[in-house]
């Protein structure tokens, strides 16, 4: 993907002096990024802990793999996207984002805890949908608040910092969730991770300050009404950069999210590990490498993107291309250690596009459509990655298992299909 000066026309003017506000916003924005990282940690943990627990859930409820895919992915993604559009419209119309974040955090935390008391597949599906509703409010709120606290050349680094919550959830949450599930059952693990979000929701509501729109760019704008969805879509589709970013987000998410959902169960079946063992090994690999990539990717793209805008997407595209062969080897090898060694590379590189991609959307968009344009990219990633990839890979697993007569081999061939979509998209 190549970015041009035309793509950045809406925000190419140099920033004026920041307006005065009644708090030290430069210091406060560091706290905001920290608390967003904590909230995103819980967001990622509550969303993805099912990955380490799904084998136990399958055995208790006697589910097929496609049902697991619908439960872990589609139920969440469908409602995430349904609530995301009106939330983004509400934000672009001037809503207080701090309150939206706090309310969504409380909702998805309660829903996660309720997953632990469900008695059948349909109840679990309903709770996963409620998690999607809660988390659908988080992305457009935090993205636009970060854009108001940080200038265009510092946004990727800031967003990469709070996106550290994603790999840290894997580093801490998966080993903890696997250990609790092994010793106390999968229900206890879900109830344990759901409760802390209520405390963080209260902290967000009481301590995070809402910034004026455009604060860091020195051009505060009073937003009274959002731009119509059709107009935003028309503006977005006229820019090749946005179209390519939407395609890249969808394709990369099929690979990364689909792999993340199914790899824990694949490792349990292929290498005969329990949830605690997989949580420790998989969590460490994904957590450490992902943390390095989340912050490092934002820092690198901001550094090089300040020199030439094309680097905001060309560097992540190169990183994802490098990761593809390692991902394929990990799915087909019969060696435990080779599998984990190969997973280090894609785990480190596959999400490198996220901070850069978010920063690009916020730089392209006028103030009154930033939330909605950011939500378009998030929807593309979640609809394909969380909504379509898990049930499709689960269905392939059932099909391959039927024809090969082996559940493990069915999962292996299904998992190896996910990286096929993980290729760079360039203009």
Image (cartoon, rainbow, N blue to C red):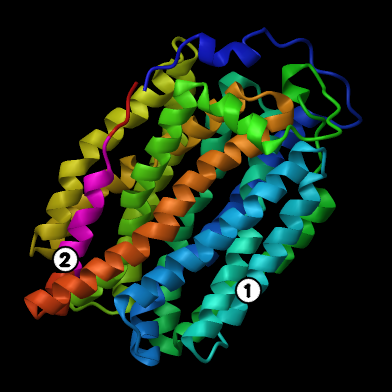
Q: Is residue 139 inside the magenta stretch?
A: no
Which residue does the numbered mark 1 point to in the structure image?
A: 111
Q: Nearer the viewer, residue 362 or 343?
A: 362
Q: Position of residue 395 (x, y in %)?
A: 27, 69
Q: Which of disc 1 and disc 2 is earlier in sequence?
A: 1
Q: Residues within 10 Å of mark 1 (few under 14, many from 20)?
A: many
Q: Position of residue 171 (x, y in %)?
A: 42, 59
Left or right? Give the position of 256 relative to 123: left
Q: Secondary structure at mark 1?
A: helix
Left or right? Give the position of 418 relative to 2: left
Q: Quadrant of residue 331?
A: bottom left
Tell me if label 2 and label 1 are in contact, CB under 8 Å.
no
Which residue does the numbered mark 2 point to in the structure image?
A: 412
Looking at the image, residue 228 lies above or below residue 2: below
Q: Nearer the viewer, residue 314 or 299?
A: 314
Which residue is pictured at 79% across the width and 30% down the height? 25
Q: Quadrant of residue 103?
A: bottom right
Q: Position of residue 390 (x, y in %)?
A: 36, 63
Q: Quadrant of the N terminus?
A: top left
């Amino acid at each position: 993907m190549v970015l041009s000066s035309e793509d950045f026309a809406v925000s190419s003017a140099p920033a004026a002096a920041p307006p005065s506000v009644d708090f030290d916003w430069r210091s406060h924005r560091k706290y905001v990024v920290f608390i967003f990282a904590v909230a995103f940690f819980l967001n990622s943990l509550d969303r993805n802990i099912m990955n380490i627990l799904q084998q136990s859930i399958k055995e208790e409820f006697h589910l097929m793999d496609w049902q697991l895919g619908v439960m872990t992915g589609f139920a969440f993604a469908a409602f995430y996207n349904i609530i995301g559009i009106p939330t983004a419209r509400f934000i672009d119309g001037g809503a207080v984002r701090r309150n939206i974040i706090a309310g969504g955090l409380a909702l998805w935390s309660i829903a996660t805890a309720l997953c632990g008391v469900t008695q059948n597949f349909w109840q679990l599906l309903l709770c996963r949908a409620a998690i999607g509703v809660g988390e659908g409010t988080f992305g457009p709120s935090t993205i636009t608040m970060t854009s108001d606290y940080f200038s265009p050349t510092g946004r990727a680094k800031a967003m990469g910092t709070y996106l550290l919550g994603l790999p840290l959830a894997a580093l801490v949450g998966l080993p903890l969730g696997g250990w609790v599930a092994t010793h106390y059952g999968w229900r206890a693990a879900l109830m344990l991770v759901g409760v802390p979000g209520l405390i963080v929701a209260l902290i967000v509501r009481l301590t995070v300050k809402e910034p004026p729109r455009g604060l860091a760019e020195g051009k505060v704008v009073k937003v009274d009404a959002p731009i119509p969805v059709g107009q935003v879509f028309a503006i977005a589709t006229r820019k090749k950069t946005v179209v390519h970013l939407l395609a890249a987000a969808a394709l990369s998410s099929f690979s990364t999210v689909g792999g993340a959902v199914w790899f824990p169960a694949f490792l349990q079946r292929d290498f005969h590990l329990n949830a605690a063992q997989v949580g420790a090994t998989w969590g460490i690999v994904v957590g450490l490498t992902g943390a390095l990539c989340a912050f490092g990717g934002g820092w690198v793209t901001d550094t090089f993107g300040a020199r030439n805008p094309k680097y905001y997407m060309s560097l992540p595209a190169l990183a994802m291309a490098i990761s593809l062969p390692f991902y394929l080897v990990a799915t087909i090898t019969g060696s435990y250690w080779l599998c984990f060694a190969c997973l280090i590379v894609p785990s480190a590189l596959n999400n490198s596009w996220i901070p850069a991609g978010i920063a690009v959307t916020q730089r392209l968009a006028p103030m009154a459509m930033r939330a909605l344009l950011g939500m378009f990219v998030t929807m593309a990633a979640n609809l394909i990655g969380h909504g379509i990839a898990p049930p499709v890979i689960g269905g392939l697993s059932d099909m391959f298992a039927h024809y090969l007569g082996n559940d493990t081999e069915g999962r292996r061939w299904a998992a190896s299909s996910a990286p096929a979509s993980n290729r760079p998209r360039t203009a």
